[in-house]
Image (cartoon, rainbow, N blue to C red):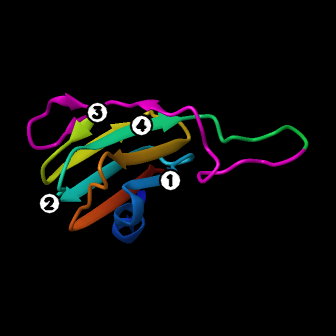
Amino acid sequence: MAVSTIIDVTRDFNADALVKLDVSGWDYIVVQLVSPTGTVTFSSTNDSGAVQGVIDGNASTAINFIATQGTNLNSGAATTTLAASGLVRFASIGSFLQLSGADLVTCTKILIQLYKIN
């Protein structure tokens, strides 16, 4: 049996072309972009920005993101960006996923589906 949840991050992303999510504990992630106005880049990190003995760190404090490769579900090609409507599947990435865009890219909708296989 599998468990999944869908998160709509459209409003957060459109505010400043950036969203960070804690995806630790999930087996894979599918990101759906609808009508982006530019290129959205996918990055990941394990660095929560924690300061030992001071703060634990979380998605909002996460740092040191690097491009992460997913599979474009339309073409089957590996990708680290998407500039059109589509779905990208990620497996085995770091603890945090970041979607970012230059020049205040916006999207009509961004849905993140998180899957856990039991």
Mark-to-mark CA distance, 2 and 3: 17 Å
- Looking at the rendered structure, the kind of residue marked 4 is Ser
Residue holding disc 2: 35
Element marked by disc 3: loop
- Looking at the rendered structure, the kind of residue marked 2 is Ser
| Residue name at image x 54 percent, y 34 percent | 45
Is residue 5 visible in the rendered image? The answer is no
Element marked by disc 2: loop
Mark-to-mark CA distance, 4 and 3: 8 Å
Q: Which residues are magenta?
A: 54-80
Percent x, y for residue 100?
37, 47
| Residue name at image x 10 percent, y 43 percent | 74
Element marked by disc 4: strand
As drawn, the residue found furthest toward the right would be 53
| Sooner in the amino-acid sequence: mark 1 or mark 4 | 1
| Sooner in the amino-acid sequence: mark 2 or mark 3 | 2
As drawn, the residue found furthest toward the front would be 103
Query: Along the horizontal axis of the image, is 28 left or right of 31?
Result: right
Find out whether the residues at labels 4 and 3 contact each other: C-beta distance under 8 Å. Answer: yes
Percent x, y for residue 87?
20, 50
Residue holding disc 3: 80
When the figure is inspected, residue 81 is found, relative to residue 30, above or below; the finding is: above
Residue holding disc 1: 21
Mark-to-mark CA distance, 1 and 3: 16 Å
| Sooner in the amino-acid sequence: mark 4 or mark 3 | 4
Residue holding disc 4: 43
Residue 76 among those drawn in magenta: yes
| Sooner in the amino-acid sequence: mark 1 or mark 3 | 1
Residue 69 among those drawn in magenta: yes
